Amino acid sequence: MFISRRSFLIVSSLALVVCSPAPAPLSAANQAPTIKDTTKVLVTVNGQPVTQADLDFATLSRKMAGDQNPAPAPLLESLINQRLIQDFLADKKITVPAEVLDQNVSRIRSIIRKKEGDPDQTLSELGFPPEKLRAAIELPLAWNIFAGSQITPEKIQKYFETHREELDGTRIEASHILLKLEDPSNQEAVDKAKAQLADIRKQIMDGKLTFAAAAAQYSAAPSKQDGGKLVPSAYRGKMPLVLTQNIFPLEEGAISEPFQTPFGIHIARLNKKHPGQFSLEDVRSEIYRSLSRSLWDKTIQSLRSSAKIDWKTDRPS
């Protein structure tokens, strides 16, 4: 039950990586080192503190996972969530066997040694004593024990059956028509574009216009002269996920209702579906991770509804 390098990132964040813009370089006059109080309490969660040392360790974890400029706001939100889950798991009396925890502490120390040098010195400079390191590593291990008790083989089987085409390697060929928006927050413009595409869709379905001709005439997509064709893709493949999410549920030859993505407003046609070959056993671990993530999110949502979160410093934006 070792914790992987990816799990080490989860120890500190348990969230998606959110990068902030790189800061402008400091002038020589402004490069004097500042002394940071690692014991400073940034926020309390049901009376439990989140300190500057916790944030510094979370930042180090992100950097070792490849994010060289982690933003503090999402890291602090992740640390708040961790405090809530720690209390939740303690109430459930979930414990990690000491030998398993010892093995994973050693593994993490080895990763720190490779990336940063002496782990004791690195953690000391962060104000992160050994007991806090153990607690940080224990959290995802304890969560896995709890999640394993909740995610039954029957739930995994049901998830696979419900999401089979997303998981089994099914590939689709599709085309779309795109109307771009100058201001995506302008609801009037959004409604107008959707109405225009709804009318275009009706003309295509009534046989007054082919999809390819409509794409050439109206679409703002680069492939407009090629019938609006999208790159063939699996559910999580070369095609942006925001498109596959809307196209995969269609039957072959069907045209979607207008839908919005960060690119603009679309209608899409599913031209061809190529069945996949992956079995449940091929994707069981992926399903488990997805169900564990969903369980984590639902648990956090429930815990936050009654949590007392008290900011002791300016809340980062």
Image (spheres, grey):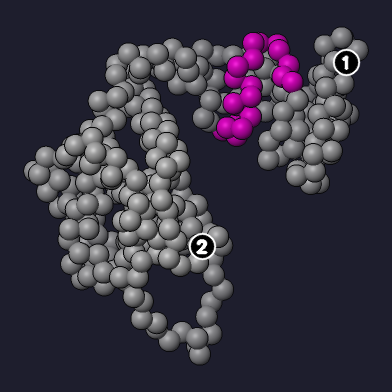
14 shown above or below 49: above
Q: Quadrant of residue 112?
A: bottom left
Q: Of residues 309 and 212, which is closer to you in this image?
A: 309
* Viewer-nearest residue: 198 or 273: 198
Local secondary structure at mark 2: loop
The residue shown at (31%, 56%) is: 48
Image spot of residue 30 (x, y percent): 50, 86
Q: Amino acid at mark 1?
A: Gln
Is residue 317 visible in the rendered structure shown here? yes
> Mark 2 vs mark 1: which is more N-terminal?
1
Does residue 245 belong to the magenta stretch?
yes
The residue at 43%/65% (across/down) is 312
Q: Main secondary structure of the magenta part?
A: loop
Q: Residue furthest right?
A: 208
At x 55%, y 14%, the residue is 274
Residue 61 seen in the current view? no
Q: Place residue 127 in its image quadrant.
A: bottom left
Amino acid type at mark 2: Pro
Mark 2, residue position: 316
Residue stretch in magenta: 238-257
Q: Residue at x 54, y 65 (%)?
A: 22
Residue position marked by numbered label 1 in the rendering: 203
